[in-house]
């Protein structure tokens, strides 16, 4: 089935650094979602985006719905150790509102 | 607490056996989704139920089946288990089917180990 291209696959950064990750698709999406999964837990919704160009923040996290509607970006500013986890992008394809498509995740490690 | 309850949290069973995983969705949510997550893998969509009816199927094996009951809780049945079925199984719920303003709310998962 269709999957989103999420990059980078993993990141290892120093505490205090900013982080950027992105998600791309070959088709147009009308919803982008960003989730975080911590070890032993289910994914938790961080940010939801519904309009092209939309920029939404949640604390130190900012996500954008790409203008082409084929990509989305997540930025984390001033990273802290508790940002560790796997970040997943997901979205609804404009041609199929029923099935949520997922990326394979970006694994983030933060060195204190 | 996300409001989505999954039991059991851990399950160890032998190959060839059958197990049932249970999920209670968040109060008011009508849709239930089942996902499988293997080690170092992303989330693989298995199946979705909406208000008691099957709504969408993903990469679900024929040995696996699910149902959603009138009280909206759901069960995922895994039979003739193989070593490769060892994984985390997540249940998620949402208020309705398809695109919504709430995304999906996930439970904490059931870790299945087949030995």
Image (cartoon, coloured by chain):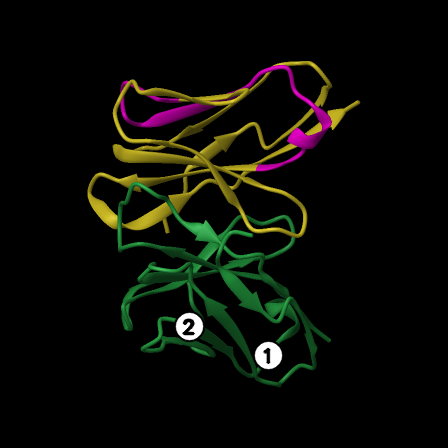
The residue lying at 51 percent from left, 43 percent from top is A44
Numbered mark located on residue B81 in the image: 1
User: Is residue B92 left or right of B20 when viewed as pictured?
Assistant: left
Magenta-span inclusion, residue A75:
yes
Q: Colour of chain B?
A: green
Note whether residue B58 is visible.
no
Sequence-earlier tag: 2 or 1: 2
Vertical position of residue A23 compared to residue A64: above or below: below
Dividing the picture into quarters, in which one does residue B65 lie? bottom left
Question: B11 or A60: which is nearer to us?
Answer: A60
Circle 1: is it few (<14), some (14-19), or many (20+) Cα within 10 Å?
Answer: many
The x and y percentages for residue A63 are 43, 23
Q: Quadrant of residue B34?
A: bottom left
| Drawn side of residue B91 relative to residue B28, left or right | right
Examine the rendered structure and indicate whether residue A82 appears above or below residue B2: above
Q: Residue at x 53, y 82 (%)?
A: B79
Query: Mark 2: few, some, or many residues within 10 Å (few <14, many ≥20)?
Result: many
Quickly name the residue at label 2.
B74
Q: Residue A51 location, x and y as percent?
A: 25, 26
Which of A82/A53 is in front? A82
- Magenta residue span: A64-86
Measuring from the top left, give residue B69's x and y in whole percent. Answer: 35, 78
- Indicate the colour of chain A: yellow
Q: How many marks?
A: 2
| Element marked by disc 2 | strand
Q: Residue at x 52, y 57 (%)?
A: B107
């Amino acid at each position: 089935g269709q999957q989103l291209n999420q990059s980078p696959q993993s990141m290892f950064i120093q505490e205090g650094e900013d982080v950027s990750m992105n998600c791309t698709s070959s088709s147009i999406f009308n919803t982008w979602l960003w989730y975080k999964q911590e070890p032993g837990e289910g994914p938790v919704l961080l940010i939801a985006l519904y309009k092209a160009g939309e920029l939404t923040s949640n604390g130190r996290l900012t996500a954008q719905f790409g203008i082409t509607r084929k990509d989305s970006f997540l930025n984390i500013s001033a990273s802290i150790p508790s940002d560790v986890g796997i970040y997943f992008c997901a979205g609804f394809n404009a041609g199929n509102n029923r099935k949520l498509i997922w990326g394979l995740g970006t694994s983030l490690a933060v060195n204190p | 607490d996300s409001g989505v309850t999954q039991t059991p949290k851990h399950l160890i069973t032998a190959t060839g056996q059958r197990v049932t995983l249970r999920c209670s969705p968040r109060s008011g949510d009508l849709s239930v989704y089942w996902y499988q997550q293997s080690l170092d893998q992303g989330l693989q969509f298995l199946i979705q139920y909406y208000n008691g009816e099957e709504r969408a199927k993903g990469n679900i094996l024929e040995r696996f089946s699910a149902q959603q009951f009138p009280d909206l809780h759901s069960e995922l049945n895994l039979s003739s288990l193989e070593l490769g079925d060892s994984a985390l199984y997540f249940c998620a719920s949402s208020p309705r089917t398809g695109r919504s303003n709430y995304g999906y709310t996930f439970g904490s998962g059931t870790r299945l180990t087949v030995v």
